[in-house]
Image (cartoon, rainbow, N blue to C red):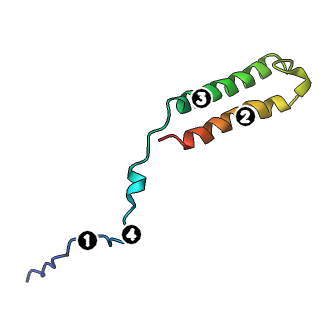
Amino acid sequence: MPKSQVRKKKVYTPPTDVRPTTAAATRKPSPVWLPATAVALIVGGIGWLVVYYLSEQEFPVAAWGYWNLAVGFGAMVGSLILLSRWR
């Protein structure tokens, strides 16, 4: 049986006008407070919700009622927003 021909492929070089700019490569790392604040918000939000449920909805703030859930989940969402900015 005859052998098929092997085609040689050219090496791909990306076009120069599509390459990323050097500004993206020179970004500064995140400040130290950013991950620390994000972790504190996660722990605080979970702690807020745990206290709310274990105290049978009397603590942390009884007058807020179900808004305590919004505070706990809002803290956790805030930490996710901060973590999306982390480099």
Residue in the image at 73% along x and 36% along y: 74
Q: Amino acid at mark 2?
A: Phe
Residue in the image at 44% along x and 39% along y: 29
The image shows residue 13 at horizontal and vertical percentages of 26, 70
Which residue carries the number 1 mark?
A: 12
First reached walking from the N terminus: tag 2 or tag 4: 4
Q: Amino acid at mark 3?
A: Thr
The label nearer to you, 1 versus 4, is 4
The label nearer to you, 2 versus 4, is 4
Are the residues tagged 4 and 3 within 8 Å (C-beta)? no
Which residue carries the number 4 mark?
A: 18
The label nearer to you, 3 versus 1, is 3
Q: Amino acid at mark 4?
A: Val
From the viewer's perspective, is 87 left or right of 18?
A: right
First reached walking from the N terminus: tag 1 or tag 4: 1
First reached walking from the N terminus: tag 3 or tag 2: 3
> 23 or 20: nearer the eye?
23
Residue closest to the far top: 55
Mark 3 neighbour density, 10 Å: few (under 14) some (14–19) many (20 or more): some
Which residue carries the number 3 mark?
A: 37
Label 2, label 4: how many angstroms apart (C-alpha)? 41 Å
First reached walking from the N terminus: tag 4 or tag 3: 4
Which residue carries the number 2 mark?
A: 73
Looking at the rendered structure, the secondary structure element under dot 2 is: helix
